[in-house]
Amino acid sequence: MNVNRLTSQLDFQAQALTLRAERQRVIASNIANADTPGYQARDMDFSSALKAATNQMPAAGQMVTTRAGHMALPGGATAEQTALRYATPSQTNLDSNSVDMDRERASFAENSVKYEATLRFINSHVREMLDAMKSPSQG
Amino acid sequence: MSMFKVFDISGSAVSAQSQRLNVVASNLANADSVAGPDGQAYKARQVVFQTVLMGASGNAAGADPGNPVDGSAGVRVSTISEDQTPGRKVHQPGHPAADAEGYVTFSNVNPVEEMVNMISASRSYQNNIEVMNTAKTLLQKTLQLGQG
């Protein structure tokens, strides 16, 4: 059996977890800059970012697989490769700050819950693996 | 680990907001200060916030500070500006600090404005503390990954 197949599902969840942490950081920046004049709120399109991270081509300077025996590379989910977009302000503001605190708080709560969900997926996957590895005589 | 940067970002915001709260406190404390012997009354102060990039990768450091390409953007207090509007004058000839025409110059602090500023600073402070608390909880759960 291919060992890669054991962990490919885990790799996907790990990518999702990394992206959730990145998004958490972006939203924290928006909340921190809620009173800064001229600041433009940013956010990421999560589904397209995850799609990009899971079937990503290696960038220059990264390790590449050149022989059949090499192990496959995990895709990298970082903010540098993730396109951040600017939020459109729902209300005009005198200091041209586009942070909408209600929206940011909602996104933050949503992202926290989904981060936890991904953590649970990984946890149950690990437990599943360990259960499958046990011998029938073991409890 | 990018989640650790949340503490840097929110920490910078918390310290900036507490500085704003300090300035509001000194403004409110001096709301009824009168002009001293030099004729200059206390002038209301305001903090000016500025976005600061936090340990971003090299390409982000040169970017426009208002719109960093990297996600990490903290806050700092760039300057503290003084309100230059003239202080309010009250006719009180018996006051020891009155001028030749009997007017006393008070500071130019507007207490209503300062109270609103205080509420806004306190709400922003609370928001950032909550962001840090959530990040802490999530990190603790990440540390327990695979244990249960």
Image (cartoon, rainbow, N blue to C red):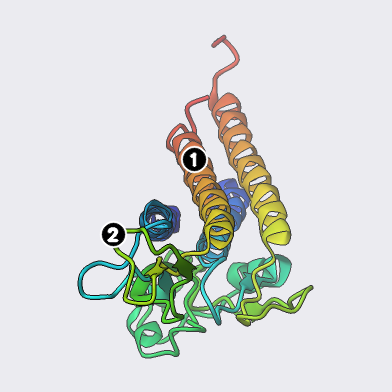
Query: Does residue B12 appear in this view?
Result: no
At x 69%, y 78%, the residue is: A93
Q: Position of residue A88 (x, y in %)?
A: 74, 78
Q: Secondary structure at mark 2?
A: loop
Q: Is residue B30 visible?
A: yes
Which numbered disc, 1 or 2, marks the residue closer to the eye?
Answer: 2
What residue is rendered at 62% in x and 36% in y? A120
Q: On residue B96, which mark appears?
A: 2
Label number found at residue B51:
none
Query: Residue pushed farthest right?
Result: A90
Q: Of A4 and A92, which appears nearest the observer?
A: A92
Mark toward the start of the polypeptide (1 vs 2): 2
- Quarter of the N terminus of chain B within the rendering: bottom left
Q: CA distance from mark 1 to mark 2?
A: 53 Å
Q: Crowding at label 1, few (<14), some or many (≥20) Cα neighbours within 10 Å?
A: few
Number of marks in the rendered image: 2
- Between A15 and B142, the residue placed more toward the observer is B142
Q: Residue furthest left?
A: B37
Q: Quadrant of residue B23?
A: bottom left
Residue A45 higher or lower than B27, as above or below? below
The answer to whether the residue labelled 1 contacts the one labelled 2, judged by CB atoms less than 8 Å apart, is no
Residue B133, labelled with which disc?
A: 1
Look at the numbered disc 1 and give the secondary structure of its residue.
helix
Give the residue type at disc 2.
Pro
| Mark 1 chain | B
